[in-house]
């Protein structure tokens, strides 16, 4: 047994001294001192040693373990020091080099406009709600009083995936889904990306963003709608902003209107931005059609409501006097840094 321990110790020392990495040292440690290691096997064989020799053999085993652990630690420090020295040589810092400027990002102009808009309506008690961009025809058209033969359902205007599934053309389906739950009262704002088959130019894109609002409760009138839009316009464009409602037609509202605001560039006097009229068209709105309420499970004899839709890119272009909508999507840092 003594000869075996002596040979094991000598072989272990040779292996440790030949090790070139910390991983190799760890493998040697496991093979010698681990649960299934060589030295551990010797300890397990102590039962076969004569009783009178066990103290001497046990002492020799402990001395061998201590010697191996001491050499392992010594070699570990040597290798670790060598690795550190090599790393320091390879990672020398040249203090004469110019510093690297940290590029800090900021919000996109669309997001700035959306945050400002949401802040106003949240202050009025609205809840921001989002919905799926891939939508059912039922929610995008049918529940919004848009009949089968309506031009908006033409494949030239809408991206259909199947006969009944499409990329939503507006965020109004979120309103239909909320009304369908039957929880009253409703005061929501639904922002999101929408899709229409438009050619890309300075004012159009096949993918853009809308923000729609919906209020449904007892006793809601057109006066509530006008007061809401008027307050938002003053908060968003400036306290001197005035609003003007013009009759229009939307299938899901009755009566319907388009809203103009006084040009915030010239104050309504007439300039290049408002094309000399003093007014800028800003959104569409109206009282929720009784049929829409009924189709969504709400009694139009008890409840009424209003809805409005705002093109996010449109108000962003107007607010920041941007001439081309495509600039918002090109991710040109020179452009974005202006905001």
Image (tube, rainbow, N blue to C red):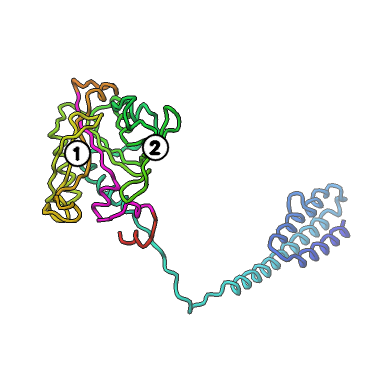
Quadrant including the N terminus = bottom right
The residue pinned by badge 2 equals 133
- Marker disc for residue 102: none
Q: Is residue 21 magenta?
A: no
Which one is nearer the viewer's eye here, 3 or 118? 118
Q: Quadrant of residue 330?
A: bottom left
- Say whether disc 2 or disc 1 marks the residue closer to the N-terminus: 2
Indicate the position of residue 115 as horizontal and vertical percent values: 28, 48
Q: Secondary structure at mark 1?
A: strand
Tag 2–tag 1 contact (CB < 8 Å) = no
Which span of residues is magenta-colored?
A: 303-329
Residue lying at 20% horizontally and 49% vertically, measured from the top left: 236
The residue pinned by badge 1 equals 258
Indicate the position of residue 304 as horizontal and vertical percent values: 19, 26
Residue lying at 80% horizontally and 54% vertically, measured from the top left: 38
Which one is nearer the viewer's eye here, 128 or 59? 128
Q: Vertical placement of 68 versus 37: above or below? A: below
Quadrant including the C terminus = bottom left
Q: Vertical placement of 305 versus 245: above or below? A: above
Viewed as shown, does residue 278 lie left or right of 48?
A: left
């Amino acid at each position: 047994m003594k000869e075996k321990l002596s040979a094991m110790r000598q072989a272990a020392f040779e292996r440790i001294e030949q090790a070139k990495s910390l991983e190799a040292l760890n493998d040697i440690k496991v093979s010698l001192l681990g649960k299934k290691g060589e030295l551990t096997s010797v300890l397990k064989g102590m039962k076969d040693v004569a009783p009178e020799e066990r103290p001497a053999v046990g002492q020799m085993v402990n001395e061998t373990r201590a010697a191996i652990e001491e050499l392992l630690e010594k070699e570990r420090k040597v290798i670790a020091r060598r690795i550190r020295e090599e790393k320091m040589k390879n990672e020398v810092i040249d203090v004469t080099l110019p510093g690297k400027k940290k590029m800090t990002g900021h919000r996109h102009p669309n997001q700035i406009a959306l945050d400002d808009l949401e802040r106003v309506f949240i202050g009025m008690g609205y809840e921001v709600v989002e919905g799926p961009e891939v939508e059912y025809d039922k929610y995008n058209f049918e529940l919004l009083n848009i009949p089968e033969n309506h031009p908006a359902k033409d494949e030239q205007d809408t991206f259909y995936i199947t006969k009944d599934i499409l990329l939503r053309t507006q965020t109004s389906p979120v309103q239909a889904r909320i009304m369908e739950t039957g929880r009253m009262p409703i005061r929501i704002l639904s922002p999101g990306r929408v899709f229409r088959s438009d050619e890309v130019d300075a004012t159009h894109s096949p993918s853009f963003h809308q923000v729609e609002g919906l209020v449904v409760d007892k006793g809601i009138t057109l006066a509530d709608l006008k007061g809401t839009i008027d307050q938002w316009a003053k908060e968003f464009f400036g306290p001197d902003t005035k609003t003007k409602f013009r009759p229009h037609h939307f299938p899901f509202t009755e009566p319907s209107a388009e809203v103009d605001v006084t040009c915030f560039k010239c104050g309504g006097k007439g300039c290049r931005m408002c094309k000399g009229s003093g007014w800028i068209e800003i959104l569409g709105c109206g009282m929720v059609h009784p049929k829409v309420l009924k189709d969504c499970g709400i009694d139009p004899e008890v409840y009424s409501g209003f809805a409005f839709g705002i093109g996010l890119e449109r108000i962003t272009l107007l607010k920041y006097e941007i001439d081309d909508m495509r600039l918002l999507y090109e991710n040109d840092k020179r452009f974005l840094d202006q905001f």
